[in-house]
Each structure stands twice: as C-alpha cells, then as structure tokens.
Image (cartoon, rainbow, N blue to C red):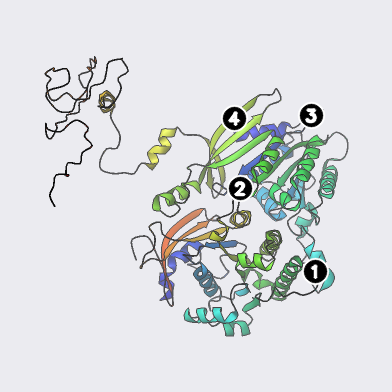
Amino acid sequence: MAESICRALRDGALEGELAPALTIKDSVASPFALQVFSHVLSQLFSSILAGKSQSRGLVVVSFSRSPSFYLDLLKNKGTDIASSNNQIQILDCYSDPLGWKDQLAGSRNFTALSNEVLVSSTAIVFREVKHMDKLYNSIIELGKGLVGGGKIRFSIAIDSVDEMLRHAPVSSVARFLSNLRSHDQISSIFWLLHSDLHEARVTAVLEYLSSIVASLEPSHQLANGQRGDLENFSLIKHNSKKGKFHVRFKKRNGRVRVMSEEVHIELSGINFTSLPSEGAINQGLVPKVQFSLQLSEKERIDKANVVLPFEHQGNGKPIQIYDGRRSLVDGKHERPFAAVENVQTNENCGSGEIIYYRDSDDEMPDSDEDPDDDLDI
Amino acid sequence: MNQRSSNLLDEALGLDQVIEPWPLRGQVVAIEDQVETSGSFVLHHLLKRSLSPNSSNVTIFIAFSQPFSHYDRILRKLGCNLVSQRDNSRFFFFDMLKLQCPDEGITPEGGLIALYGKIHKTISALPEISWKNVSIIIDDLSLMEVAANGSSDYVLDFLHYCRTLTSEFDCSLITLNHEDIYSSEDRPTFFIQMEYLADILIKAEPLATGLATDVHGQLTVSNKGRNKVSNFHFKVKENVVECFYPGRS
C-alpha cells in the first residue's frame, strides 16, 4: 500500500491536470510521519535516479531538518550523492529561516560558520520564509535549474507544512500549494503535517488540496486522564513502535479508495505490513491469569438460553413474575422452582434456570415496606 | 553513592557508560513536569552529569526561573561546585530574570535574537573540539514565553534557532516545560511542538494511585534515537534522587 503511494508519485501528472499531491499526517500519539516521509522520499529519488519516474529531479524544501539529514538519509540508502547533485536540490529553510544570522552579522562580531562544501553545492539557504511568493519563485527556479525549462518535470517534497503555517496564514499556504500543483513542470508534490498543531479546518484545507491523504494513528487508543498506570504504559510502549497507516486515494475517475496497513518502527527504518485481524490484537492484551476468561460455545448458548425474570418474551402472553410462593393469582399449583413465566419451546436441553425462594409468605410481592420498621430500638 | 541510585535515569538516557564524548550530543532533550511532580531534579541531575570531572563538557545555562545562588546551593548538595566551574569557563550562566526591562527598542523578538547571538558567540569562542560537548540548558520555557510577552511564536523561532545550533555544533539542548500550564488549552500548540522537536522526552508525572510517602512520582523516558521507552518511579531526597522500578523502593 505504501507502494501504491510511491507508484502514484512516480507516475506523476497527466497533461493538463493537477499534479498528484500527498499529505502525510500524524499526531503526537503516533509521531511517525517523518519516517514515512523519509521512506517516500528515498523511494521516489531512487526511481528518479533509475529513470523510472516521470519526474527528472527532486527539490526538497526543508524547514524542520538540516539539509545534511536528507543527504545522510539518501547516502544510507546507497545513493551516491556526489554524482547526483544534478538531480536533487535542497532549499534550506532550516538554517536561517528568518534571517537572524544576517541581522546579527550586521550588528556585532557574529561569525557565521561555513557549511560543508558538499552540502552547499546541493543546498541553497533561504532566509525569507514569511514570503510565500519568494518561496514559490525560489522553488521553481531550483527545479528549473535541475531539469531545464520546457516540458521536463520535477517533484517537490516539503518538510514540513507546519512551519509554513506558523509563518504565513493558511490561505497563503493553500494558494502556494495550489499554484505548485498547477505548474506544468511539477510532476508530483508531497508534504508532512502534524495534525494536532493546527485547527481542524486547517488540516481539512490541506486534505482537500491533496489527491492522497496518508494518516498515522496509534495502534491502541489511550484513555485520557489515565496516563499513570502500568497498563497504560504498556500501551504507550506498544504505540511507540507500531501504528496504523490509513491511506485515502482520490482517483481520476472520481472514486475514492481507502486502504489500511500496519507500520512498525525499527532503528533501521519503517516497515509496512498488512493489518492483523482484530482478535489477534486483543489476544495480546488479555492479561494472563489462571482462570478462563473466555466462554466456550456451549457456555455461550446456555447463557443465551437463560430467560431473565423481568424480560418480555415478546409473544403476547402476559408476564407473570414468579415471586416464590406456591399460590399464584390464577390458583395454579406450580412447582416452586420455575422462576420463568413463560415456557420456552426450546429443544435444547441445556436451558438455564433461575431458582428463587421467597423468605416469607407474609410479604406482599414487591413491597416497599422496610422490613426493619417493626424493630424496637 | 550517587552513581548507583540514579542509574535507571542514566541508563534510559545513555549516560550510564562513557560520558566523553557527551552521549546527548546533537540531541534535543525535553523535560515535562507538573505542579505535583517537579521535573527540576532531572535538570539538576543532567547539569551535574554534564559538569562531571570525567568530562570536558561545557554548559550554557539560560535561567528564567531562579538566580544563580539557587542552583549553586542545590548542586553543592549534589557534590558539584558551580562557582569554580564558572571560574574555569565550564559553566556559563545567563541570568534572564532581568530580561523584562522596559528598554527602548528592544522588542521581545529582538531580545531573543540577541540571546541566540550571545549563545552562538559563546560556543564559537570555544575550541572546535569542544563544540560537541556543549549542553545548552533552558529553565524554563513557560517563563521564556512570559518574558517574550506571551508570544509563543517568537519563543518557537528562538527554539528553532537553538536547534540549528545542535546541527551546526553538534551540541545538546535541554529544556524544561510545565504540562499543566497548557492543559486547559484546546490545542496546546507550543507544548506539543516541543514534543515533536525532542529526540528524548522525559515526563515527570504523579502516580495514578495518588500521593505516597515512599514514591514521589514516575518518570517516563521516550528515547526516539534508541527506539526505547522506559518507565520507573523516583524519590527526591536531600542529596540524591533514587530511581527504581515499581515495587522496589
């Protein structure tokens, strides 16, 4: 399923249509969006290098992490960065997004350190993140620098939209993303979003702008306000390594496809597996004790057969609740151990019974009298 | 012996073995606490570890909460002399309690930019080999927000730039924030943002069962780098903090 996402981004945009856009969103309960983002990025870049994708270059707009993080990531996946810097460019909105270093360099003896040579050939520092228009132009310029003008397309990865939303209103960010999608040289675009940092409507706006929405949820929901106990800790531990991955595809023919998988976070990276059945998950959480907590089939049927004394049987007969006395309203002499009011024509011999003996015949049925009233204290 | 009893905390943070080079280098450590369970002891413990005689660590301490004398007194009980460390240029104390003076032309943003510049300058002045052994400690973020006239945006910008310091110099950043201040908000953005930024998250919470004499609270340490989550109880004593698994005090 993660494969389907990568395929969609690889295939890119059709002539005259908007480029496919992917939102990867998570929350603090399952904060794995970065791992998913890194996975998608490395897969897409591999396809670009292999010439298997529509896009011929990748522009990474990095707000949350330094450019060296992405270069190291790709290097660890076996990509030779030094020879491929005509296929990837990083717009560095991390090192000095607001131009503070420039300001300080102007006033005092602030010595800015020089970046590594390798990084600076692949990364361009951008200092005006509050200006969406300038950001847009810089991205397009970088992309054209990679693939040239004309019809050749490039892809864009944004890490993350949260930082953009801190510096600019949601309408500007929406317009920015929309313009990118409609640019005829953009093949595909994807971004990372932490949903609990924004109002629901902001997340909704970004989801409307996307053709694919991938969301991460915790495997087990924690009960609010009960953070302290041991059981909750084992859930927290569980949730720190696993999560649910839901993807919603908006297809070109108008249909929507929804798929789910499980993600496992390991030190080496992220793994996607199909969801186990519900029972398997719950089995793991049932505490191991020395008595049986499950019902066997026979026990379940017997339990279903017990007719409770206050139940309506739904077959029109009046209910007579046996109150333990031998004589009843209609004077019938009944055996004192059938507490059910209606006879069940159930061939199953394992029918359950409730046996009730009254304490005293003097009492009226359902008396409100307090039996201790006659005590003389 | 102090070493033995804080071992669980050190183990969870990777400080139980060698501390040179500083195991927390390049990482952001966020400590979260509540009124019932103050997390300051974690800060003091990390400060003490950082200034251990076995290492050449340098600590830059940005104090919004208490004056120097307060930390000096506490660390003395833990066996660390802050005055001599300050004189040896291993401990730099930035007293921010007076940041809120109504100077002309100093906006909250300007104040934070200047603070960032000062930290950058202090680290740059050290020999390059010491850069990864620098720890920047901020006590605490909610008071920084107050000093910035409530503008969490400026504080987040400042924290972002502090984070760039961890990439640039490979130093570590340790912050303390109070969870219950933000618990009444619908969307405690500022607080959650720190949880995303942190490589190691340390939460000090009361026990689910309430107050106790033998146990002051519980610590949950989420170490993203090692993909490990630990939980244990703690008791803060005069000269030491004891950490132990539930049931073994």
Residue indicated by mark 2: A196
Residue indicated by mark 4: A258
Q: Is residue A288 visible?
A: yes
Does A344 sit left or right of B199 as displayed?
Answer: left
Most distant residue in the right direction: A150
Q: Residues within 10 Å of mark 3 (few under 14, many from 20)?
A: few
Residue B205 in picture, x, y percent from top left: 46, 60
Given the image, what chain letter belongs to the residue carrying mark 3?
A: A
- Mark positioned earlier in the residue sequence (2 or 1): 1
Q: Which numbered circle lies on residue A10?
A: none
Q: Quadrant of residue B108?
A: bottom right
- Mark positioned earlier in the residue sequence (2 or 4): 2
Height in image: A211 above or below B106? above
Q: Residues within 10 Å of mark 2 (few under 14, many from 20)?
A: some
Q: Residues within 10 Å of mark 4 (few under 14, many from 20)?
A: few
Q: Quadrant of residue A21?
A: top right
Q: CA distance from mark 1 to mark 4?
A: 50 Å
Residue A288 in picture, x, y percent from top left: 31, 44
Amino acid type, mark 3: Glu
Q: Is residue A40 visible?
A: no
Q: CA distance from mark 1 to mark 3?
A: 45 Å
Amino acid type, mark 1: Leu
Residue indicated by mark 3: A17
Is residue A311 or residue B229 the one in the foreground? A311
Given the image, what chain letter belongs to the residue carrying mark 1?
A: A
Amino acid type, mark 4: Val
Residue indicated by mark 1: A104
Q: CA distance from mark 3 to mark 4?
A: 22 Å
Residue A57 in picture, x, y percent from top left: 78, 41
Q: CA distance from mark 2 to mark 1?
A: 34 Å
Q: CA distance from mark 3 to mark 2?
A: 31 Å
